[in-house]
Amino acid sequence: MRITQIRLVSQVFFISLFLFFCFVTQFGYLKGYPVSLFLEVDPLVGIATALTTHTVYQNLIWGLVLLLPTLLLGRFFCNWICPYGILHQFTGWLFNRRDITENIESNRYRKLYALKYYILFGMLAAALLGSLQIGLLDPICLLFRSFTVAVLPLVNLPTEWIYVRPHVHQVGWVVGFLLLFLVGMNIAIPRFFCRVLCPLGAALGLLSRFSLWRIHRDTQKCVDCDLCLQRCEGASDPHTNLRKSECFVCFNCIDDCPHDALKFEFLPDVKGEVSRPQLDARRSAVAALAGALVFPFSRGSGDVGKNFKKEVVRPPGSVAEPEFLERCIKCDQCIRVCPTNVLQPALLQSGLEGIWTPIMNMRTGYCELNCTLCGEVCPTGAIQKISIAQKLGLGEFADLGTVKVGTAFYDRGRCLPWAMDTPCVVCEEVCPTSPKAIYSREVEITDRWGQMVKLTRPYVDPQACIGCGICEHECPVADERAIRVTAVGETRSKDRSLLLSAAGGGGCGSGGCGCKSNKGLMQIEAPAQGPA
Amino acid sequence: MERREFLRRVGLTGLAVAGGAGGAAWLYDPRRGDQYFRDQQVSQAHKLPSFRVERPSGSVDLAIARGSDPGQLARAAIGALGGMGSFISKGDVVLLKPNVAFDRAPLLGATTRPEVLKAVAVLCREAGARQVLVADNPINQPEGCFFKSGLQQAAAEVGAELVLPRASAFAPVEIGGEVLGTWPMFWEPLARADKVIGIAPCKDHNLCSGSMSMKNWYGLLGGRRNQFHQRIHGIVSDFPHMIKPTLVLLDASRVLMRNGPTGGSLGDVAERGTLIAGVDMVAVDTCGYTLLNRDPARLEYLHRAEARGLGSTRWRESSWREEQVG
């Protein structure tokens, strides 16, 4: 068996594993599967979150496992494990209509391929200041997001295999067409994403210089036929001075060499090899500067601070917004696992930094009272793993109080019993807390024809309301609901609290100043009033 | 130009013209606006057959079982009505309709108890049913509701098939009620069923005061159910018109006394150790409403239904039996 065949087996295994994880990341199938494993072993996730949070969160420690083959072999991950790389290789192969000469030409190194390093530098510089943006282009985040937001809803459309009640995802078309574009670019430039854009590939490429095994060309045997280039995945120039940082360790060149001139050798002579990516110092500096400016520019826009948007209702267990943006990698695993479809990828609701981060849209779903799945699958702790008892503030968690994601407010100009003398109170019916956060008062009014009418008019008890939004979801005023949840009152942030609480430390009060004094996960709230 | 070539090219152009014109003529829509919207209203609506069975004269119509074990209560009540054999024929497909509206643990009283569902399913099997279906269209997310209410496991244990409310399972049904005209229903399980048995918990309801065997049929409807609340008593009294089930069970072994229909606290639930079965939903609910410590005379939908001849609130005047279990 040739090594390239073994590689193929590995690729089939890992893409299947990815698809399996994608499918089982839902209520009925999740069980104990480590569905975020690919994200956890992704060292770029580990490194970048270490830069933003100065910690390595839980399973992200597994990123070390992936560094090992990189330090021994090079960018082994890119062509053996990475599901996004596998997708690109497969589609590139499927739509390849080049002849041998054209293949050889398409696989020569181009200066454009250095772009990924500048992207990486920009993202790491942003991370250093506290803005985590690697998820925009990290291949694992990008692929999970694409599947969650665009591919699975597409599969479900004719088959109903994925959801019982169909899920929708706002701006899913952007994610879908982006996927189509990135995959389609393989026709113009093979492995376009991997060679040009991938920040993870760039990070692994930088580490490749230390690797012990490398492709070595025997110049005595080589006749300069360039046939080794015809299936070179990384465009790493094995026909001349190998660019180790670009090599995907796919072994195609060794397979294709008719003269047995290429070998994968332990500690070969690296003279004449281009061990490091060829980068321009000024461009690197500009990229890093641009990345570093993301933080001051976006925080200066106020979206995280005093101009925060009411729509930014984060999943239960989320950490306070500044820290959320240090942790969320936009993988959208939470959106995938959310059983009610309430979680949606944000566009600009939470500012430039928050693109594709999860926010709640109570029109598409609601937060299920007895559910904490989003935190279960979150690989970075942007949504903490909380139990249902903790979410409800029961037992040993009573001191932490109920986790509230926001508060519901009536729009009395749109509410049927308030504005239109029409009975309703669906909101009260579905309110899941006990006692209900929505209560009603009976009133007798004279309608426009002079008739006495009895009506039940609803109110919100802000102590009991957890912001789950099922009231908004079920409200019959279908477009702009007559009861709507906004972020205020969320327990993750003292700055956004609503009621004076009995205890709990305050932040500096300015909101989003970056001060860490309100970093505590959940503030201590006075317990809600007991049932009558 | 050769004649053959001439004919070929003119022929091709002619075919393209004819094809285009033919296609356009076939798809041509000359309707005026009013006709368009009228046509929209006439949809291909199904009609729901009656699932009732002939009852031998002198048979018991309402049975009240009292005791502690909910499964035994169901057996006793159905036994008192003449046994499941008097409702189910050999080879029947039986649809069981529990109330699984909310994502709640069984003991919170917001959903049908799994023990009752299992007992009824086993009785159906013993009476020769070919297949037992379990279906509901919950308010909360369906998979979560079936899982946490314990009904998914209960169905699996007795070999009943769970039918989930996928979009394709719904179809418009002509109901012709006071409020409900044609409305989308969870049609797939209904279409497959020969007999339908409703198994409802007895619950407080914030708007209509009681959610019992009549209100349970809300769960077979789709569409904009959140509009029902605007005329809730009209809607609930439409249900016995909409569906004629073979049998209904009202499980009042644990009654959700307040904070309904969702509940959420054990403090909202009271042990009442009662299960009522019958063929007249109005009678069953009149009887059951007393277990909420409330006066049936004041429950509007019961009287509306009775006035429409859809059942009787005077169950004590019919043939009924009470059984003590254990």
Image (spheres, coloured by chain):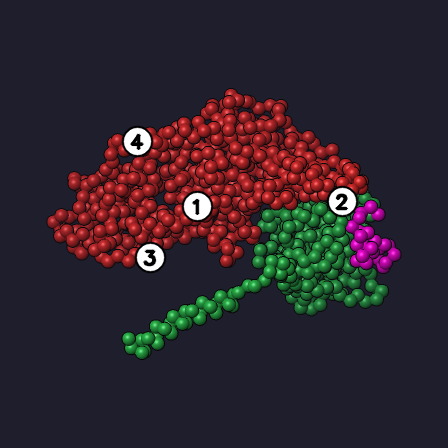
Rendered hue of chain B is green
Q: Which residues are magenta?
A: B297-326
Graded by Cα atoms within 10 Å as few (under 14), some (14 to 19) or many (20 or more), the crowding at tag 2 reads some
**How many numbered circles does the render carry?**
4
For mark 1, what is the residue? A174
The residue sitting at the right extreme is B317
Q: What chain does badge 3 belong to?
A: A
Who comes first in sequence, dot 1 or dot 3? 3
Q: Are marks 4 and 1 in contact (CB under 8 Å)?
A: no
Identity, as a three-letter code, of the amino acid under mark 1:
Val
> Is there one chain holding both mark 1 and mark 3?
yes
Identity, as a three-letter code, of the amino acid under mark 3:
Leu
For mark 4, what is the residue? A286
Q: Is residue A504 above or below residue A17?
A: above
As for residue A102 lying within the magenta part, the answer is no
Q: What chain does badge 4 belong to?
A: A
From the image, state whether disc 3 or disc 4 is nearer to you: 4
* Cα distance between the residues tagged 3 and 4: 38 Å
